[in-house]
Amino acid sequence: MSGEGGAQGGGAPGAGAGAAARGGAAPGGGAGPAPNAGQGGAGAGGAQAPGPGGKPGPKPGGGAEEPARPAAEEGLFGAADADSSGKEGRAGATVAATRIARESRAAFSLHDASTYIGGSIGSVNFQLGGAVQTLLAGPVPDEELRRLRRRFTKPPGYDEFKRRLAADRLLVLSGQPGTGRMHTALSLLDDVSHGKVARLDPGSDLTALGADSGAVETGHGYALEPDGGRLPEELHLDRLCKLLGERDAYAVLLAVPDPGDPGSGRGRYHRAHEPADPDAVRDAHLAAELDKEPPERRQEALLVAARPRIRAALGLDGLLPAEAALLARLLARHVTGELTEDRLVARCQGFAVDQVRQWFAGGARAESLPALRDAAYRIALAVFGGSSFSIVAEAAEQLAWELAVTIEPERVTGRPLLSDGLEARLASARAVVETRPQPVVAGQDIPVRTVRFRGERLAPALLAHLWEHHHNMRAPVLRWLDSLCQDRREDVWTRAAVVAGELCRHDCAHTLSDLLIPMAEAEQARRGLFVATALESVLTDAQVGTALRTLVTSWGESADVNQRWTAAAVLSRGTATAGVAEALGRLGRIGTWEEGRLRVVAGESVVHLAGAGPGREPLARIRTWLGDNRRHHQDLGLVTTVLLAEFLVEQLWNPAPELAGREKWPLPLALAAVHPERAPEIAGLIWTALNTSRSYEAALDAVAEWLRTCRGTPWEGELLRFLPLLALTADDRQRLLSLIKELAEDPDDPVGQEQTRRLRQAVTEVGIR
């Protein structure tokens, strides 16, 4: 056929050739028709003049050269578009998916090479100078009590606690581990017993205490945190209270609230314990640690604590009292020259690690269903931090089921209904609820109640600990992530994919073989997108990046269409190759493989690359494809050009920094605004698509969408400057004028008169740019 040697006889002109060169020699060699060749001539043919009624005329290149079916949709974009879930059509990334992927990936940007060496921050230990001291069963030494008096900071409600203890003899402080309950208990008992304080063994059986028991001495105060944090029923507490009264003694018991209990419990002895202000705790411990140093040392320590490097190393929004006490000791050691700043930073980075280690410490209760649900909620929060509370809660329940059936495969596990509460869940996971806009309805922001950890280091620390220290957790977690990929909500599968990539850093081979490689070979497009999203950042990892890039290369050369599709999706992120040119070469091979079977996903990936950086290589490669004599290369160039015209900046996976603030702009106009020298080159690509019969309809629809929606937008002026570059010949101008007239006469949504006038003026006038 005389028109198949090149799209419009040889492709779009280069930027340097200018608009006047559009009818000149093609980069591919063949000579194209002159701009005024009309609807006939060699090549794909120019656009025909409008038909009756001012409507745009038939597609260019009529006659027997084109099939009767809609060539632009079935010939170029393929019948695979009918099933968008298959791996032959577009990747189909939405605005919400691209934005959520960037936000979620930012949560895992903390990858430290440093190693933390130090002790743990226990739930019932308190810092009393020197190493962490654990008060065992028996009397608390006087020296320890004196240290406590100098350092203790009263929590909210302390005076009321003291009155209740003096009156009732028994007090139960209900709160989360690490909130300073033991500090408070010892201080209360010290106040009422005048220094006769002892701590009972955690395994003490309170139900076995009788009137003749010698365990309770007259005038003493006792602190107890039972194993598991659970206390006997109130009947046994009444018996204990009676015994304490008979011995003129006191007791403070520590409890952890049930998931549905916000913290106070329902018993008359229970009181909710809230942590003391961490800054006040830190200051009190600093004063004690530096009491023999000059006053300026304390001020120096406070300045060090306020440094961005130290705050970033902690990675926690607020410290627990035990953490604040440990930080004070570390600061004191630093300002006295005992600890270097680098070592201080390394120790601070261990705070989040210690918290996670405590959460997953194991023990007798670790595999009970309540403990599994706690673990599942924390893992779900690490995956979906910043997402809606409902998504986190539902995902946690799904993971809890996976964990439970892993332990007992034949057990039928249900869900609690009224015994699970928001407040206790947040407290046990160090989480906070916020109302933030999220693009969860048709890609538009609406207010959503979101939840996240109180600290950016907790999520990465949790995933690392889970993968490196609990091998048997891997299988249920990977099954869970696989099931999340089947969720159509971008806020679900996208965040799950980002976490799968993070797990690759900790055990690449296992995560690939059990999760990502099967997804790459699957037929569903979302699974390919999941793999691309997972690998995007880990492809640059110093340890596993090279191996992963080799894997992606093998996918791109595979005989399996699903692996090739996945490779194209990965290449769209810009991290799978050493440079853009290499990525474009691979996408060209994928897009022309098997008669262009995957040209749509390949072209879409090229568009992502075109908007991801300042270079012009993607535009030049599209022009080269358009000028190629081979039909499938031409088609790849045409498809890529049409997709370029359809894309908005906010649809890009990784938009270039210079495009910031233009998220709602059509991508070609945004690129033209940022790089005015490239406007003729971009217009030349679109002009070629408009003047090639098999891409005419799709390209015209994209331009029509610009004209219809530009009114009052920040990019309206850029469009008015861009239109003359599409209207070089009389036929070009007539086509655009006819399109404007059609939009103005649309009975359902007509373009306004003033907008019509401005668009017509932009098309008819020359030299606006």
Image (tube, helix red, strand yellow):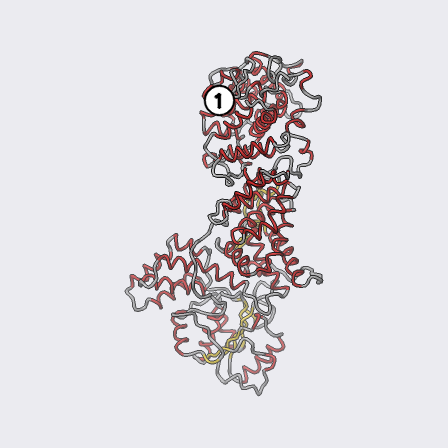
Quadrant where the N terminus sits is top right
Percent x, y for residue 315?
45, 55
Percent x, y for residue 117?
43, 62
Q: Is residue 253 left or right of residue 49?
A: left
Percent x, y for residue 367?
61, 65
Above/below status of 237 relative to 401:
below
Of residues 724 and 273, the one nearer the viewer is: 724
For the point 54% across and 63% down, which residue is it? 359
Q: Please tell me how crowded label 1 is: few (under 14), some (14-19), or many (20+) other residues with Cα within 10 Å.
A: many
Dot 1 falls on a residue whose secondary structure is loop
Amino acid bearing label 1: Gly
Of residues 670 and 278, the one nearer the viewer is: 670
Work out which residue is located at the far left of the displayed protein and give it. Answer: 294
Of residues 495 and 718, the one nearer the viewer is: 495
Q: Is residue 314 left or right of residue 422?
A: left
Residue at which label 1 appears: 14
Percent x, y for residue 425?
58, 59
